[in-house]
Structure formats: C-alpha cells, structure tokens
Amino acid sequence: MKEGVVKKGQDIGVGRGIEPNPVGSKYAGIEVKESDLRDGRYMSIRYSAMFRYRWDTGIAVGRFLEGLRDGRIVGSRCNVCKRILVPPRVFCELDFAQIDDWVYVYDTGRVNTYSISYIDKQARRMSSPVIVAVVELDGASQGMGIMHLLGEVRPEDVYVGMRVKAVWRSREERKGAITDIVYFKPL
Amino acid sequence: MDIIPKGERIGIVGVGYAGLADIKRVSAKDHPSNSDTISTNTSSSIDTNISTNVSISTTTTPHYSYKELMFLAARMAYEDADIMVRREDRISFICCTEDFWEGNMISDEYMPDQLGAVLRPLCTVAADGLYGLITGFMQIRSGLVDVAVVEAHSKLSDVVSRKEIVRFALDPVYIRGIHPDIDPYFIAGLEMNRFLYETGNSRESCANVVSKNKGNALANPRACYASNVDSSAVLSSPVVAYPLTSMEVSNYADASIVVVLASEHKARMLKGSTDGIVWIDGVGLCSDTPWIHDRNLADATYASLAAEMAYRMAGIEIDGVNKYIDLAEIDDTFSYKELQHMEALRLCRKGEAGILVKEGFTAKDGDMPVNPSGGSLGVGYLVEATGIHRVLEATLQLRGSAGGMQVQGARRALVQSWRGLPTASGAVVLLSSNQ
C-alpha cells in the first residue's frame, strides 16, 4: 500500500461484499452459480495442464509386456528365496538379490479375493457391475499373480478359491498391454 | 554449543549411482528434450567424452526402468558400505521424489522394493536430495536408527512435459497467467540481471563458470556435458531469457544416486576403522518466501542462512570458511548461480566471485576449487538428485578416489543445493574425512 493513496494506518476496509444467501439454499454461506462465474461476478482462474510421460519399461516390465503380446505370462525366479515372481522383476524385494532367471507361468489360477464394483468413478450406478479379482496363477509362488477382471460369470456365482483361466485377445489384436487379456473366466 | 559432540558423529559409509553418462548405449528413444526443452547447442546431448576414450555417451537410460536404475545404484552403495541391507534392523530409507516428475501420485509408495526397503521405515521428502540427507542425519542423531539410506533420482527422459511441470509450479494468480506460453526460465533471467546489477559481476564471469565446469567435467566419467568451450562461445549462444544464454543453462540427465549414512559406532563396525568414512560436520537448510517479486533477487539469502546454520553446527567462523574448506560442490543450475552461491556462502565477498573464477582460484588446481566434478553444467541436471549427486562427488574427493578430478589433499568439502526454479530454498552440508 503506497502512502498518499491511503493515509498511513488508515483502514481501507473491504468493498461491499456479497451478502450470504439467506434463502434459496439449504447450506450456509454464499452460493456460487455457474452463471455467476460466467457473468464475472467472481474471479475464476482456469488452467489446464497436460502432463505427458513416456516411461521406459526397462527389462522386467518390457519382458512381461512382450510375453503378453505372445499370449504368455512371464515371471522371474529368485535364486535366493526360490520364489517365482509375477509380474517379474530383476530384483527380489525380500532378499534384495538380482534376478536373471525368466519363466513362463500358466494362464490359469485361483481367485484369491474379489470385489464387485457397482459404481463408476463418478460414483454413478453402473448398469452391469464390474468384477475385479486377484488371481493366483498356476506355476507362480503362492500368493503371486495378477489383478484382472472376471467375465462370463454372474457376480453371485464368484467365490474365493474359484478356478479361472485367461481369455486372450486374438494374436492380431494383442499389443503388449495388460488388456491383451480381456478377463479371466471360470475354468 | 551446537557442535556435534565427539563420538556422536554421523558418517557417509556408502555411495552408489546408476545412469548419468551411460557409455556405449545410444538411446533408441527419440529424446523428449527436443520437444519440450530449450534446444541448446546441438552437440550438448551427445558430447564427446575424451577422458573415457569412448566416443558417445548418452543422457538417457532407455534400457532400464527407474526402479531398475534405483536397484543398481542401491546395490552399488550397499556393497560400498559393506551392509547386507535386509539384515539391518535399525535402518530407515528416505527417498526424494516429486509426484509430477514421477508421473504418479504417492510415488514414494513405489520405492521400497528396489531399495531393499520392503516392510521397513520409508518416507519421502519432496525436495532436493540434500534435504533427504539431512532427514537421515536427524533420524540417526535422534537415535531412531543406526543406518539411513537416502535415494534421489532423475528419470527426466521419461517426462515429456518438463516445461509444463515447471510452469505448474508458478503461482496461479500472480505469475502463471501473465503470459500463456512463456518459458519459466525468465525467472532465472530476472535473478541474473539483478545479481549482475547489484554485485558488478559481468556476463563474461558467468560464461567463465560454464567454461570451467564443462572443462572440469572432461575428467568425470559420469559427466554427460563435458566439453572444451570458451566463454565467447557461451556468450554468443542463443539467448534464452536475457541475460541468460542457452549454454548457461544446465541440461537434463538420468541418474539414481544412493548414499548410506551410519552412526559413528555403526560406521566403525562396518568399516573396521574410520578410514573411508566421510563425516557430516554440519547441516543447514532454509526457505525464502515464494513471492518472487518481493524477495531479494540479487542475493541467494536462503543459501546464506543455510550456510550459517551449517557453519555454526560445525564450529566454523564465517570469515574463515574459504580457508577451512578444500573444495566446494555448489549449485550451478545456471551459470550465474555458482557466482551468486559463492558469495552467499561467504566463500568470497560480494562482487568478488567473478574475479576469483577468472583468475583460476576456483579451478580444479586453484586455492578453492569450486565444482571440480563439473557441476550441473558439466555433468547434467538431475532435478531432486542434484544435491545428492554433489554429495557423491564430494565423498569421492574426500576419500581420495576422485580419479582425474582429484583435488590434492582434500579433507573438507562444502556441498550446497538449490531446489531450482521457481524456488528460493536450499541446503548446505559440510563434510570431512580423516585422510
């Protein structure tokens, strides 16, 4: 605040504020409508930023995605703890050993746990619920597997321990992504 | 007194890195710097590194994911420290990451596996790696743990929208809106202009810093931007944001850096003696106001105050700092920053930094070597790993294992970091060895 504009120490006060809306809203405070912003009654700042990334897959993720494109699930074996890890990594998180031993595991397995999602990300009810499951894959160490969708099954028929098998996209459709598997279905 | 009592010191027992100048493998990936960064001199991203006798080095690491890069750095650091990381039970892990640089919310949650930190204490410090080092220092000092692992990395080759992310750091009401397209480097231009105006340092002095640091980097096998370049070439390179030219801006590189800290007792147990242990004698940190238009743009006040804190802890008289220290690895994100920081850290008086650089006092074989590693201008800019990379270089110096960069008889080093645009935050660490 510059001297001369306002006397030093003088309370310049605030401009006539907008009175809280006493009626028309069941909530306390000031209700701001879309039209208020449009008409410039309030200052609004619109800023959209697009952040783009191009992650290097590195060794382990790269091998896994290549495997999916070939219609196979790749794991890696730790020579210290002997576990077969899926998805694969080049280091074991339990004993901090380097891993360079690659294996295929089966695309069949057992449901470890599942949930049935009835709402979408906007919290709207979905007409058909989505079943998400953690699948322990055959050939991998106990507790190891992937998370994916379940299909060709009614929500009420899913159970923990259910045997399932991957349903793959056709060779031409596969592009090295987790969606190369459409879902797992009951075996 | 704030001096660390004898017998309670904290030492660096291991350092490791991966990435940086990755010789041989030329990036197959179209380097995103072309699309979102200032294009600097065309030779800078593939600089010839004569010291290693290999013709091409690259600043990207397309063959490793950031997790794999971290694993390699951590493994090297643990071997260096002689620790079996999974057998340590009084250990803590600190990562320095920013979610926007990672492209992932809660990026810290993705860090444990590759550091051997699963089911162990781990936290993220969203700041420069030196803040992480100081956090580890405090955790050991408080008696919480005996060993602290500090990691910071740059995987900027994964980030396409680098400039957009820096723009996003600007104040949305007052600054971001003033121009829709302007590159955030203009803030560096504003600082540089005021710094030169107030101190009388010249643009030539700033260019000399670039020449010195890129030259020093020729002896650094980790350097991505080493070259013989004279100051006239620096000054005649395209202007980015007056008075800053493109060659005065450090360029991006990929790296993961890991530093292992231990209490003195633990460090002696690991090493069998105090040989090779680099002690942390003082630490300091400081943040200035985010009001760019209201803070002192000429002086790096944050660096002055962080340094005072560190000098006090180490029991050093401010007037005698330049005599006490054998070398300094300080922030040179932009050319003028090295001069500004030299003066702020009281390595010289205000207005003298440029002369000292010109007369060779800060050269590798000078009285007071500054950035003998090549700094950010010579090695590459590593976002949050920038400060901890300086710790790595200083540690090698104090162990007497810096190879062609070795400063003879180096026993005490000063390391300083700045958090980068648009901040005025920084940290200082004082290191020493028994060499």
Image: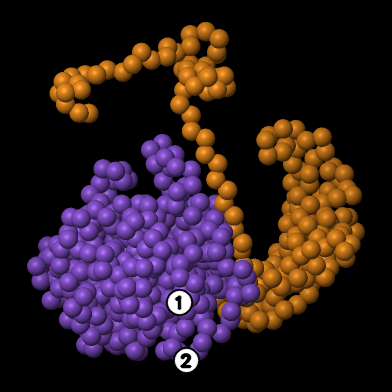
**Colour-to-chain, purple:** B
Q: Please state which amino acid type lies under the numbered disc 1.
A: Cys
Q: Position of residue B282 (x, y in %)?
A: 22, 67
**Colour-to-chain, orange:** A
Say which element carries label 1: loop
Q: Which of B188 and B379 is in front in this view?
A: B188
Residue at image point 78% right, 44% down: A130
Residue B17 visible in rendering: no
**Quarter holding residue B397:** bottom left
Q: Which mark is residue B112?
A: none
Residue A96 visible in rendering: yes
Read off the chain for label 1: B
Q: Report the residue marked by disc 2.
A: B53
Say which element carries label 2: loop
Whether residue A90 sits left or right of residue B345 in the image: it is right
Quadrant where the C terminus of chain B is found in the figure: bottom left
Q: Position of residue B200 (x, y in %)?
A: 17, 61
Residue at image point 40% right, 75% down: B379
Whether residue A15 sits left or right of residue A32 in the image: it is left
Q: Nearer the viewer, residue B95 or A173?
A: A173
Q: Is residue A74 above or below residue B271?
A: above
Q: Position of residue B346 (x, y in %)?
A: 16, 65
Read off the chain for label 2: B
Q: Please state which amino acid type lies under the numbered disc 2.
A: Asn
Quadrant where the N terminus of chain B is found in the figure: bottom left
Q: Report the residue marked by disc 1.
A: B224
Crowd tier of the residue under label 1, counting other residues whose Cα lies within 10 Å: few below 14, some 14–19, many 20 or above:
many
